[in-house]
Image (cartoon, rainbow, N blue to C red):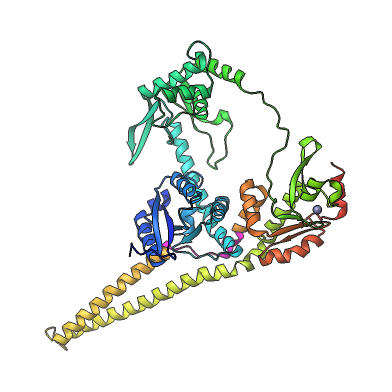
Amino acid sequence: MGNRTSPDRRKAYAYVRVSTAEQAQHQTSLRQQTVDLKKYCTQNDIDLIEIFVEPGLSGSDWKRPEFKRMMLLATGDDHPVDCIVACDMARLARDVEFTVITQGQLQRAGVQCLFVYQKFEDSHFGMLHKLLTSWQDQDAIVKASMNTRRGLRGTAEEGFWVGGTVPLGYESRTVEVRSKKEKKKLFLNASEAAIVRMIFDLAEKGLNGSPLGGRAIAEYLNKHGYTRRGKKFYNATVAGILSRPHYLGRFPGNKFDEFGNLLPEEEWTWVDCPQLITQEQFDRVAALREERAPRNKPPRVVSGPTLLIGLAECEACGSGMTIRTGKGGRYRYYSCNSKVNRGASACDCPNVRAEKLDELVLGEVADRVFGEEHLEPLLTKVLDTSDEGRQHKIQELEQCEAKLADARRRLSNLHDAIETGAVSPRDPDITARLKQRRTEIDGLNTTVTTLHQQLERGPARITSAAVKKFGEIVRRELKHGKDEARQQIARAFIEKIHIGPKVEISGQTDALAHGVASVARSKGEVPTFDRKWCRLQDSNL
Ligand SMILES: [Zn+2]
């Protein structure tokens, strides 16, 4: 089987993960996931290249080292795999924004996502389904991470090391074990501490009295065989070391409240650790580095997202829209390429303020695709299919349980007959029937257990309340989320934006198609893109 190579076989990375909460409930163990993944790959002619394992305690979607490593490899130029396989969507991501970004990266690299317990269409609709699924229990996740943050806060308040990378110069040692949890503190690591002190000395006095910059220090250390636990030094790592508060004997153990918001500095919890550098030297080095730093110049061009480049098209001349700046770089405009390249006379399309168009278009996607009244009809199919598979299993379970009750009843009848002497237990026919009943009961028991497990493990039913909440989350992301996520959602659902006297958005989903006409006609909250509005913007140039 392993030697069979045909062009139809696909290569895959597999990803398994359990969260702390799941680990506590003994759900979806790493072992079970690995077994299910291997079986799935065998059944689907997929060669498993590597399994990436993220054990519990790995924190948020954004901080998972193994996932990062897998993404980096999977999206590499050498295209090592055709797909990524995971048991369900929640293994890969539970945060809408994160899902959108990773899915976009994989899509661009031509890598497909496959799930053992779930199936998604390869279309805009499938993308929507994926988004919804990834979100499903974000609520639960938010609550779980609140608890984790509370826990971290407590750990920091008691003066323990809260985990993460131990800074160069220290090592963490367990000082106490409390209800199976190891409590750690930072201790000096003599050989590493010597390197840290040398870095500060070089930054202050150099080799012959004149201070060295970060790059020169890194070069010196690498040339003389010093490492950071086996890794090379760079300008950035030296800069990081020279500004690390730990070396003064204390570090911020917690900077966030239980909702994940950054607290003002005076509310941080500080934890003591061994001091490595004197306050005086630390300050002298900081002053020297401040002097050497290039003056902070305001950037000439306002940089910003280019959310709609590649999607927006000039209605008058058909060329793409690009970003240009006006008002000495203070404003950004979408302007058509022919106008930018061949001068204002080439096309009379209006310049459109970038943030206004971004806001309008993303706002439309938010309301038209993810609006409450559009989302549910659009997702009826998802609601149906998610229920169908589950209903099917529940039915099977009910049937098995009925059969099991029947088999038990018949076994008990046999026992009754033996007891009353109606039949003899020594009758070979009776012995055979007893054995048959028992085998049947064992088999049915196994099936019932398996079905129960599958129902527990499989994706939860998508309810219309979940769809509603999902809509809220995506609308919020689209309007206030990270630019990369907003751009990815726009790309996933918009095909073209025609910019002329009116703005027309077209996309594949029904909601978008129906949305177009009303965008142009609307006179309500959505700003209309008529000549007047555009001229108004022109006068701003
Ligand atoms: Zn044009």
Q: Residue furthest left?
A: 426
Answer whether residue 356 is visible to the viewer in this image. Answer: yes
- Residue 392 is covered by the magenta coloring: no
Answer whether residue 336 is visible to the viewer in this image. Answer: no
Q: Nearer the viewer, residue 512 or 110?
A: 110
Residue at figure coordinates x 46%, y 59% from the top left: 88
- Residue 461 is covered by the magenta coloring: yes
| Magenta segment | 457-469
Residue at figure coordinates x 56%, y 67% from the top left: 382
Residue 77, how many percent across, how many down? 51, 49
Give the quadrant of the C terminus.
top right
Compared to 165, does 360 lie above or below? below
Residue at figure coordinates x 42%, y 36% from the top left: 163
Residue 519, how many percent across, how many down? 77, 60
Residue at figure coordinates x 45%, y 74% from the top left: 392
State the image quarter where residue 457 is shown.
bottom left
Q: Residue furthest top?
A: 209
Q: Nearer the viewer, residue 49 or 276?
A: 49
Q: Nearer the viewer, residue 171 or 422?
A: 171
Give the quadrant of the N terminus.
bottom left
- 123 with respect to 2 (left or right): right
Compared to 412, does 263 lie above or below? above
Count of number-bearing discs: 0
Residue 80, how many percent across, how many down? 45, 53
Residue 15, how many percent across, how many down? 43, 53
